[in-house]
Amino acid sequence: MIKRKVKADTSASHQEEARAAEILGRVRRMEVRTNRLVDDSLAGRYASVFKGRGMDFDRVRNYMPGDDVRTIDWNVTARTGEAHVKLFTEERELTILLMIDVSGSSDFGSVVDSKRELAAEAAGVLAASAIRNRDKVGLILFSDDVELYIPPGKGRMHIMRLIRETLYFQPEQRGTNIAKALDFANQVIHRKSVVFLVSDFCLGSPFEERLNLLRTKLQVTNRRHDVIAVTVTDPREESLPDVGRICIEDSESGEVVEIDTGNAKVRDAYQKQSRTRRELTTSRIRSLGVDLLEFTNGENWMPNLIGFFQGRRQQSG
């Protein structure tokens, strides 16, 4: 009995080692790919968009004629009886916070990769760009709750950890609560930062109520930080193929529904509802002045990211 147990333990150990090697190999391959994407497409664009846009408080001094009245420190002015203004210095580094949805729906993919894998690659590109610019990068993985928080850091090993966790972290919950994740981000990130919120924005029911709550929390966060929303979608979430009767399981609630995809009316209704929810979500987000990037699984998403950087550079210019 003892020999069998030792043999079983050895076999399990070998399986764990093989799994660890597989994970490390994939993380390294993704690191190489993201670095290549940065070199080929984003070299210089990231720095021109974000670098130097933030300001750190330095000190106060007496108000002088010609000073911008918007910089008056009213607390110090009231305390001393003399007008004082705040002085700022340009930030030497930025903080990039990647907020990534790892709810059940993120595991879906009708092509080679899942939406979560797409999110991981996009996050890797953004993180690699930030690190090259000597900025810090942090990570929040969320579902119904905040599943993992990695404080902002630097360096190659830090980036590899972010990629690994985004790809392989096993969440305890399956649902989506973006509002709760935004509350957490506002609690742990105190300096003005650039926040990339990556999600499929499958909010569940009641949809309108959850969307309104998301809009409120997003508005608060965008006042404190520079928020960029990134939607990751899959083609099969927009339309159904004609393959007869199928059972579809909601990856977050576990509910199973039978759908007759051979019925054109059913397919049209599904497509209409999906389009309506997506358009309503994007319009509500954009109405806040939040930039929105849309990435679709199986398509080349880099042109959208490049276009975003170019648009930001023109705005700042």
Image (cartoon, rainbow, N blue to C red):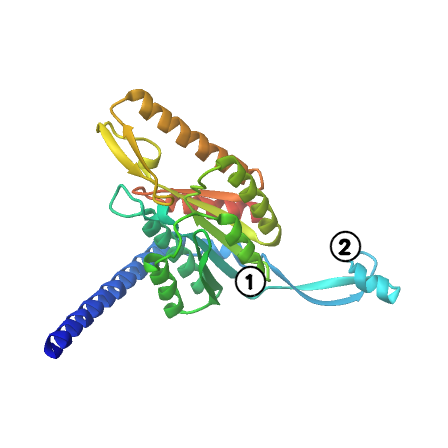
Residue beneath the point at 49% across and 59% down: 96
Residue beneath the point at 37% across and 45% down: 252
Between circles 2 and 1, the one closer to the viewer is 1
Q: Quadrant of residue 63?
A: bottom right
Residue 92 horizontal side relative to residue 295, left or right: right
* Residue found at the very far bottom of the displayed protein: 2
Query: What residue type is disc 1 on?
Result: Val
Residue on which disc 1 sits = 188
- Which of disc 1 and disc 2 is earlier in sequence? 2
Residue 302 horizontal side relative to residue 16, left or right: right
Query: What residue type is disc 2 on?
Result: Asp
Position in image of residue 53 (x %, y %): 58, 56
Asked whether residue 218 is in view, the answer is: yes
Tell me the element at label 2.
loop
Q: Which mark is residue 65?
A: none
Residue 91 horizontal side relative to residue 67, left or right: left
Residue in the foreground of this view, choosing between 239 and 72: 239
Q: Quadrant of residue 161?
A: bottom left
Q: How many numbered discs sit on the rendered protein?
A: 2
Residue beneath the point at 44% across and 47% down: 176
* Residue found at the very far front of the displayed protein: 1
Position in image of residue 160 (x %, y %): 35, 65
Position in image of residue 139 (x %, y %): 45, 60
Residue on which disc 2 sits = 68
Tell me the element at label 1.
helix
Task: Give the alpha-carbon distance from disc 2 to disc 1, as whole Å.
Answer: 31 Å
- Vertical arrangement, residue 235 with respect to residue 12, above or below: above
Please state, as top left, top right, bottom left or bottom right, where the N terminus lies in the image.
bottom left
Asked whether residue 189 is in view, the answer is: no
Residue in the foreground of this view, choosing between 120 and 317: 120
- Vertical arrangement, residue 152 with respect to residue 316, above or below: below
Q: Residues within 10 Å of mark 1 (few under 14, many from 20)?
A: few
